[in-house]
Amino acid sequence: MAVRLHGPNDVDVFSFFATAGHIYDIRFHPAVYERRFRLTDADGKTLAETQWNRIVHEAASTGTYYVHLLPNSSWGSDIEVRVDDLGTDDHGATPQTATLAAVGETVTGLIHKETDLDAISVPLDPDVFYLLSCTRECTLTTRTSGARLYMLKIEEGMWHVHTSASGLVTFIVSSSFNPPYDFTFKLDQASTDDHGDDAEHATPQAVPVNAAGVFELGSDVDVLSFELEASRTYVASGDRTTIRILDPLGAQVALAYEWETGDHTFTAPSSGTYVAELESQRPYLQREVAWSFSLREQ
């Protein structure tokens, strides 16, 4: 609807019919830096007021609502008032009502009030490292089914994401600015893990071992397996990695550190399959770091 304020004290009032539970986006065009208007219900109660050209309101009841264009500096020029029915809330607020999205899918949303929560669930794989973008500068909380989730903020609106187990992870967007504001959410695959994260998925090696790999993030654990013989002494060494050796029963083996060489020595308590758990020396990595590991009989 086209309107014009005819003087500095002119007030124009418009009405529209709203359905309970629906969200209405009220704007004036052309958009200007400052334009004051107010939204009231049929009883004259003020529901919202702004000087920033936009109100988004969720109707509590079905009926007639009123838009009051208040005196402002745009008087004397033609403007248009627009009311869009956005329907009900675009995303649920909990993991149970979340919007299901795929990796690589772009999800848009609107935080229409301060208490609005928009939940988005994405199935994640522990063998994959992800890059999450959410703009404009989303405030995020997460819910998992119990798996450990690693999130490292790179910059405003971007995070590294890695999970310890397969399953749905729910990301909940909440208000970080004065609503209303729109957001865009996307979770992309960044890289794939080069070695398994536990004994069950360890990369088999033959002794002597000379292995290399990459820590994609500080949360990455790379696990190698190899066969050792009881009562024999072995020497392990690594570059840019911490080292834990586990025996066939899963117990940690005590390592003796050689200060002059940086090597670790140990005697195998029994014969069988051992594993080496390798982790970054820097838990808050923001980029890939290459590592190397060797093991030989003394």
Image (spheres, rainbow, N blue to C red):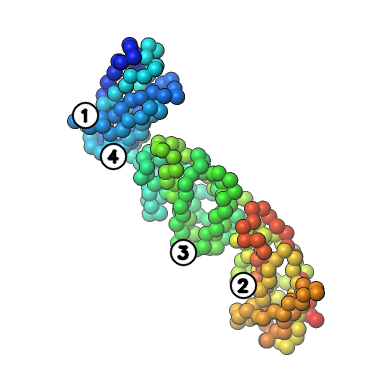
Which residue is the site of mark 4?
Answer: 21
Q: Nearer the viewer, mark 2 or mark 3?
A: 3
Under circle 4, the secondary element is loop
Q: CA distance from mark 2 to mark 3?
A: 20 Å
Q: Quadrant of the N terminus?
A: top left
Disc on the earlier residue, 4 or 2: 4
What mark, if any, has residue 199 been given in the picture? 2
Q: Decide which of 17, 285 is in the foreground and name it.
A: 285
Asked whether the viewer can see residue 99, the reply is no
Q: Amino acid at mark 1?
A: Gly
Q: Nearer the viewer, mark 2 or mark 1?
A: 1
Left or right position of 194 against 67: right
Q: Decide which of 91, 14 is in the foreground and name it.
A: 14
Left or right position of 191 against 237: left
Query: Whole-percent x and y of residue 120?
Result: 45, 49
Disc on the earlier residue, 3 or 4: 4
Disc on the earlier residue, 2 or 1: 1
Which residue is the site of mark 3?
Answer: 146
What mark, if any, has residue 44 been given in the picture? 1
Q: Residue at x 43, y 20 (%)?
A: 30
Q: CA distance from mark 1 to mark 4?
A: 20 Å
Asked whether the viewer can see residue 269, the reply is yes
Q: Nearer the viewer, mark 4 or mark 2?
A: 4
